[in-house]
Amino acid sequence: MKRSLQGKAAQIGCAIMLFAMESVLAQGGGSLTVGNLAPVQDALGRNLPGSNGNPDGTAVWIEIREATGGGGIVPPDPATGEGDDVLNPLVRESYMGHDTVGTNPGLFAETFETRLSTNAMYYARAYDAPTPGAAIYYVDSAVFAGPPSFVTSVNVEFGSMLLVETGAADGDTDGDGIPDAMETEMLGTSPSQPDTDGDYYNDFFEATHTDVLNPTEPNIPFEINRAPEYAGGGSRSVSWGANPGLEYRLEFRPAWVDGGGYSNVWSGTAAETNLEIDVQTWVQTNSPKGFFRVVVP
Ligand SMILES: [Ca+2]
Ligand SMILES: [Ca+2]
Ligand SMILES: [Ca+2]
């Protein structure tokens, strides 16, 4: 009987101990990670560069600030790019790619040991440069609340990129898909010409294929040099000036098919500055008259 009572007391003691430990953890312990799950991208669809794997000073700047009740979110100062420290007190400044992997992750994650206040609202701001003063564009996240203690992570969702100077998205005068400010201040391309260097590859395509192309220096022009002749004895191949490393596709459409689709004849990556595709066999076994076209996918 005595033994049994002692056992009961020990069980109760245990239960109280466990409860007390959980209570302590809930009040002060645990960390909070704030980060984005969808990468932040620029107008060319490129993830903003991060600090892991990139040279020092190339990762873009990130801030987490308070969004105070009455003041809302103040845009960056047009002259300095800085946020408003009075209405939007700075909580943390960091770089894109902190605690994430990859050279251009478009992602960040910040871990707080002293948790954000559950009574306050916050937002994150990403610049497109390593310092606010050098930024052309910035993007704010949706406002989020300082989460309760049992929440361990907050997903930050960003809106669209805006001009630091005016807070508005800028136009695309020449319709090549690149905003004017990005052309003039970042790429050095013409905001009024979709193909700045006149090599038949438009600025957007060149700016997104900089491993092979340069939007401000003419690459090998996109012109067909030779095409098969209808009468026998002439050329049996299609050839064009090609940029090594770039992918091309040769397609054919029978002339008499009104609005018909093209079919693939050849596709591959150029190894030299001239691509010549022998189409004799292909023409013999298919339609003798029609149109070839070269596509850069
Ligand atoms: Ca443009
Ligand atoms: Ca342009
Ligand atoms: Ca061009």
Image (cartoon, helix red, strand yellow):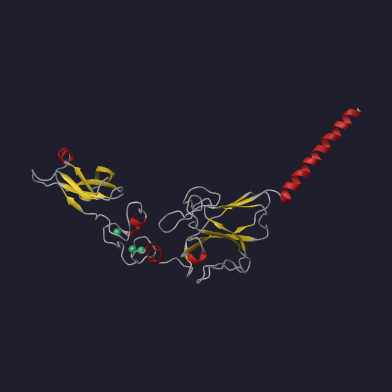
Q: Is residue 136 above or below residue 155?
A: below
Q: Is residue 141 left or right of residue 292?
A: right
Number of numbered discs on residues: 0
Visible in this render: residue 85?
Answer: yes
- Residue shown at 30%/60% (left/top)? 217
State the residue at coordinates (24%, 46%). 250
Residue 246 is situated, as x and y percent measured from the top left of the image, at 30, 48
Residue situated furthest right in the rendering: 2
Q: Residue at x 25, y 42 (%)?
A: 266
Whether residue 256 is visible to the viewer of this picture, yes or no, is no
The quadrant where ligand 2 appears is bottom left
Percent x, y for residue 84?
58, 68
Looking at this rendering, what residue extends furthest in the bottom direction? 79
Could you tell me residue 125's position as x and y percent?
A: 54, 61
Residue at the front extreme of this rendering: 56
Find residue 219 and report its image quarter.
bottom left
Name the quadrant of the N terminus. Answer: top right
The answer to whether 14 is drawn above or below residue 81 in the figure is above
Q: State left or right for residue 59 relative to residue 196.
A: right
Q: Nearer the viewer, residue 213 or 256?
A: 213
